[in-house]
Amino acid sequence: MEKARTLDCDCVILDLEDAVAPDMKDMARDAAVAALRDGGWGHREVLVRVNPLASLWGAADFAAAVAGGADAIIVPKVDDAAAARAAVAHAHGVPVWAMIESPGAVLDAPAIAAVAGVAALLAGFADLAKDLRLRPGAARTPLHYAMSAIVIAARAAGVLAFDGVFTEIRDDAGMRAEADQAVDFGFDGKTLVHPSQVAIANAAFAPTADDIAAARGLIDAHAAARAQGAGVTTYGGKLVEVLHVAAATRTLAVAAAIAAR
């Protein structure tokens, strides 16, 4: 937790679930609350991943995260909209990030994302792969349906979508490829398990200098066309419409947020 306060990440997740042995759950919960209250997190949002409500520790985890002032609560094994509603009720106004990590959750992802109080969907592909008995491989081809389903559900509901973790912490090339793939699929970010992965994820999801220049040029070209009474124009040999301007505007907003930080 001390090192996490120094990392160039957007969020820090204090994990009370899979990372903690059963006989250490109470101690981990107390440590997480202390870390939340001690502060010193700078620009980083601090989230707590609780144990499922059906477990021995779930209700106490939720209460501790709320009392400690977590920025959001990550809830594992949200298999359907009913589970999402129960999580939101226990979160008492703290945003819920629902983990999509079972076949049922993938199928019910639109309804889960639409529950008021759910702010994000977070892919849990390790559990999903186990339940589906598949072998993802480097390209994650068997997971492509689930990846698209999560992003589509999130976009339809107006919430965020985060890709799952890459566990091979010494494989920078593999991490880079998976982060780039997450960008291609439309995810807003990627969850990480090691500090060495932060810079790779930041590079993948941040607009490049060329992206920023192209966005500005496209917006300027469209504005010039509108000033002349034209609804569409071209830029760089490609047709430019309002939808392209919206995408370019978002690119500049992301770049501005990064620069401000």
Image: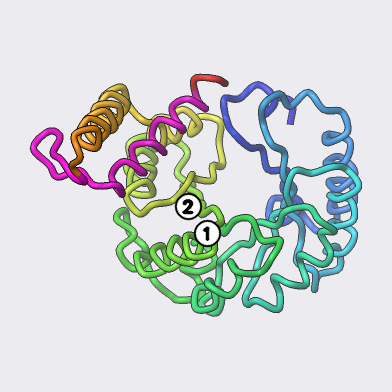
Instruction: Say whether residue 147 is magenta.
Output: no
Indicate the position of residue 246 as horizontal and vertical percent values: 36, 43
Near mark 2 (Cα within 10 A), the count class, few <14, some 14-19 or many ≥20, is many
Identify the element where label 1 is drawn: strand
Indicate the position of residue 115 as horizontal and vertical percent values: 66, 69
Q: Residue 163 carries which label?
A: 2
Q: Is residue 14 rendered to the left or right of residue 238? A: right
Considering only vertical position in the picture, is 155 above or below 243?
below
Residue sitting nearer the eye, 228 or 111:
228
Residue sitting nearer the eye, 98 or 29:
98
Residue sitting nearer the eye, 7 or 96:
96
Q: What stretch is highlighted in magenta?
A: 231-258
Considering only vertical position in the picture, is 171 above or below 41?
below
* Amino acid, disc 1: Ala
Circle 2/circle 1 CB separation < 8 Å: yes
Could you tell me which quadrant the C terminus lies in?
Answer: top right
Q: Residue 123 carries which label?
A: 1
Q: Which of marks 2 and 1 is nearer the N terminus?
A: 1
Instruction: Say whether residue 234 is magenta.
Output: yes
Identified at 38% across, 49% down, the residue is: 182
Residue situated furthest front in the rendering: 229
Indicate the position of residue 185 as horizontal and vertical percent values: 35, 54
Q: Distance between the residues labelled 2 and 1?
A: 5 Å
Identify the element where label 2 is drawn: strand
Residue 120 location, quadrant: bottom right
* Amino acid, disc 2: Asp
Q: How many marks?
A: 2
Magenta region, main secondary structure: helix
Near mark 1 (Cα within 10 A), the count class, few <14, some 14-19 or many ≥20, is many
